[in-house]
Image (cartoon, rainbow, N blue to C red):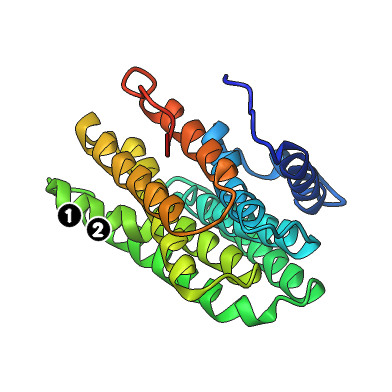
Amino acid sequence: MMPLEFSFLEKLNLVQARLREEINFRAARFEELVHLDMDELDKTVCPAIVLAVSRSCADQGQKSDALAAIVQLIYMANQVHKLMKDNDDLAEELRQFPVLVGDLLYGKFFLELCQEKLLPFLAPLAQVIGTMSEGGISRWISRDKKLSRDEWLKIIEKESASLTALAARLSAELANVSLPIQSQLEAFGLELGMAWGASKQCLEKSVVLSILQRANDILNEISSGTQLQLQPLREVYHFIAMQLAPDNYLHEAGS
């Protein structure tokens, strides 16, 4: 496992500690309730995107830390719901339990929004939850079909990239940067989520590399047009690229 070398690592550790506290319950720890197998990308990508955008936009306030935790709670809730089984020989309580735990995580994200006075973000976050669910439904409907690359990419955009894109945009909005920069950062977050999802789906390596290149191009565009401190964004790009395509990653983003 690669060590994390983000300039905002202390913030990320605090967010992850906050998440551990939020998802442990009086009767049991989260790991005792559901077995959610999360790798380094699952644990890191969503909060890291929020914190990297915040740091690049010179926003290091508590609200950005809270937003990082909120986005990760949504991601985890979605992943927990995917654990639901519908086997005929499965007890009803086991079939429905992941739904209950996932709903609890969604409840905690809403509570965080209220406590941190981030309710203006409720509408876009609720919308992205719906979009992610639409992607999951499309995947389920297509489970016995052979989908083309483009069809898979449409599902991936809904299931994972919609959340990483929104994470970047809301973080930029919280930092009060201009709308054009918000749009560029949203596009950057979208491409990171697309590359991540394409790799999870085991699409061709050339597809993943092409998406990563688009993300790198967006960073270069931002670099040439703004005075943002892009090192945190480059760090996140570098981390994801090294995880997804270590043999092909030959240059640092934005260099």
Q: Of 29 and 65, which appears nearest the observer?
A: 65
Q: Residues within 10 Å of mark 2 (few under 14, many from 20)?
A: some
- Residue at screen point 41% across, 52% down: 224
Where in the figure is residue 134, as x and y percent of width and height?
35, 67
Quadrant housing the N terminus: top right
Q: Quadrant of residue 251?
A: top left
Instruction: Tell me, yes or no, if residue 87 can be seen here.
Output: no
Say which amino acid is labelled 2: Lys
Numbered tag placed on residue 206 in the rendering: none
Answer above or below: position of 50 versus 3: below
Q: Which residue matches tag 1?
A: 151
Quadrant housing the C terminus: top left
Say which amino acid is labelled 1: Glu
Residue 5 is left or right of residue 240, and the answer is right
Tell me whether circle 1 and circle 2 mark residues in contact (CB < 8 Å): yes
Q: Which residue matches tag 2?
A: 154
Q: Of 2 and 55, which appears nearest the observer?
A: 55
- Residue at screen point 87% across, 51% down: 26
Label 2: which secondary element: helix
Q: Of 218 and 225, which appears nearest the observer?
A: 225
In the orientation shown, which residue stands out farthest toward the right?
A: 26
Where in the figure is residue 6, as x and y percent of width and height?
64, 35
Residue 227 is left or right of residue 9, and the answer is left
Answer above or below: position of 202 versus 130: above
- Residue at screen point 76% across, 45% down: 11
Instruction: Tell me, yes or no, if residue 90 can be seen here.
Output: yes
Where in the figure is residue 179, as x and y percent of width and height?
48, 75
Q: What's the CA distance linking mark 1 and mark 2?
A: 5 Å
Residue 187 is left or right of residue 226, and the answer is left
Label 1: which secondary element: helix
- Residue at screen point 16% across, 52% down: 150
> In this figure, what is the number of numbered marks?
2
